[in-house]
């Protein structure tokens, strides 16, 4: 177990780039594995989650070559792997891959770490079974490991009961192999990476108010540069907003639909923040913040940013209420519990009422806190530590490698 010590201090200044978007990286690797030929990916996330997906497509027979940061994937001829496919900590990896493997006419086993084995998988098992998939798991097929005997899928129309881009993406990946069109209908729109990338790589996708419909078919080989991850940029946005006299520019941050809700929320809280729609540059300067209400309809657009937005709220004047954030209970950790306990240990006033998270602004103090194996909890605590009185030690810091191995050195760069 590694620890990360953060002392409060002076302003954060400078420009940096963050890892390539994690959500996009998973999807691009899977689409490259399905495309018959060689695809090239630039700017892939360098976190462990995406490394697991890369190893999985390789285990399934895709050719993988990395030269000067360009990942070449030769796909189109996938075959059974020699053993279980291990996703590590990645909920996106296991759920999207379940959809793809349900279409491939051989048997696969998907497994992950302890956190993955606790997270609900019925949300993908149910729709895949309704498409005719032979897929089973532990505990009434609600948990991983998942055993998938692929092939024989039917098109479907599916309305996920929860707002989840992972479920949408899983069903759309399965739909590529179905005997007819597959439609996913969302009451609350979620991030659009699956359908955007499928359409860009030659799959027949219709995106409309009635849902997303994919026709069966495979992508064509492609070249794709992955934009910077807004979920990682959000840590620097909050850090720059709360540390006096800071000014930070994060380059080339993805700005597509339902991903940058944190920019709107921080702006509403009084942050000095701009996201350039053309370059993707995100610029944030320190300012005083006030509390706000985050509506449930906004949550899919900032679902991973709630822990660090809770840090912003703890540094704001008054109360902030995040409404309808119950989905946070089934992330890498129960983030309603871990946000409350860890920021609470630093003196923040955080409480849960039903599915709402409420934070009241006030002074923070340094503390010994714990990631609980959750990368975003670790990084949110490190950001809070920048303005706390006295030093903070985050244990379980290795969790950060899941998505942002260079977080510590990037923080050092902005402080020097
Ligand atoms: C993701 C969707 C979100 C998010 C996760 C990445 C994706 O999960 O929390 O980190 O890439 O589709 P849900 O769609 O289940 O909310």
Image (cartoon, grey):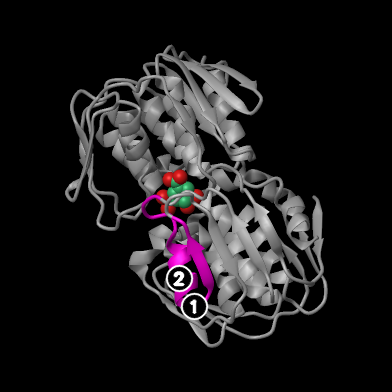
In this view, 35 is above or below 315 = above
Residue at 36% across / 20% down in the picture? 220
User: In the rendered image, which residue does mark 2 sit on?
Assistant: 265
Q: CB of mark 1 within 8 Å of CB of mark 2?
A: yes
Residue at 76% across / 51% down in the picture? 409
Q: Position of residue 326 (x, y in %)?
A: 43, 65
Q: Is residue 157 magenta?
A: no
Read off the magenta span.
256-276
In this view, 208 is above or below 63 = below
Q: Position of residue 27 (x, y in %)?
A: 45, 34
388 sits to left or right of 193: right
Between 129 and 23, which is closer to the camera in this rendering? Answer: 23
Please give the count of numbered marks on the rendered protein. 2
Residue at 57% across / 50% down in the picture? 251
Between 44 and 376, which is closer to the camera in this rendering? Answer: 44
Q: Residue 269 shows which numbered tag?
A: 1
Where is residue 359, by image quadrant? bottom right
Q: Position of residue 371 (x, y in %)?
A: 69, 58
């Amino acid at each position: 177990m590694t620890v990360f010590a953060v002392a409060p201090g002076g302003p954060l200044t400078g420009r940096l780039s963050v890892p390539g978007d994690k959500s996009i990286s998973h999807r691009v690797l899977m689409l490259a594995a399905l495309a018959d030929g060689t695809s090239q990916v630039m700017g892939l996330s360098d976190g462990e989650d995406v490394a697991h997906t890369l190893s999985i497509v390789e285990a399934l027979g895709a050719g993988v070559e990395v030269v000067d940061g360009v990942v070449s994937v030769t796909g189109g001829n996938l075959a059974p792997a020699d053993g279980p496919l291990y996703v590590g900590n990645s909920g996106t990896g296991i759920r999207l891959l379940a959809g793809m493997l349900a279409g491939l006419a051989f048997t696969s086993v998907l497994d992950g770490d302890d956190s993955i084995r606790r997270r609900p998988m019925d949300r993908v098992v149910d729709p895949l079974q309704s498409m005719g998939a032979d897929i089973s798991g532990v505990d009434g097929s609600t948990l991983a490991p998942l055993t998938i005997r692929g092939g024989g899928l039917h098109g479907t129309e599916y309305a996920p009961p929860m707002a989840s881009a992972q479920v949408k993406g899983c069903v759309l990946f399965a739909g590529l192999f179905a005997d007819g069109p597959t439609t996913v209908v969302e009451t609350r729109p979620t991030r659009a990476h699956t359908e955007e990338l499928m359409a860009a790589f030659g799959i027949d996708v219709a995106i409309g108010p009635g849902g997303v419909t994919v026709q069966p078919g495979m992508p064509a080989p492609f070249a794709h540069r992955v934009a910077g991850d807004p979920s990682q940029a959000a840590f620097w946005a909050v850090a720059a907003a709360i540390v006096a006299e800071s000014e930070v520019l994060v380059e080339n941050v993805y700005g597509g639909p339902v991903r940058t809700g944190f920019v709107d929320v921080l702006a509403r809280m009084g942050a000095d923040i701009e996201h350039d729609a053309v370059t993707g540059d995100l610029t944030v300067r320190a300012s005083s913040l006030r509390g706000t209400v985050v509506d449930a309809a906004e949550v899919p657009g900032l679902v991973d940013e709630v822990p660090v937005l809770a840090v912003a709220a703890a540094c704001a004047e008054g109360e902030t209420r995040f409404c309808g954030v119950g989905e946070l209970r089934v992330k890498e950790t129960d983030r309603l519990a871990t946000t409350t306990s860890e920021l609470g240990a630093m003196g923040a006033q955080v409480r849960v009422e039903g599915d709402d998270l409420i934070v009241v602004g006030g002074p923070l103090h340094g503390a010994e806190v714990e990631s609980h194996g959750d990368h975003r909890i670790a990084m949110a605590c490190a950001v809070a530590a920048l303005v706390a009185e006295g030093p903070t030690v985050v244990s379980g810091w290795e969790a950060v490698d899941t998505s942002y191995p260079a977080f510590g050195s990037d923080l050092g760069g902005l402080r020097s």
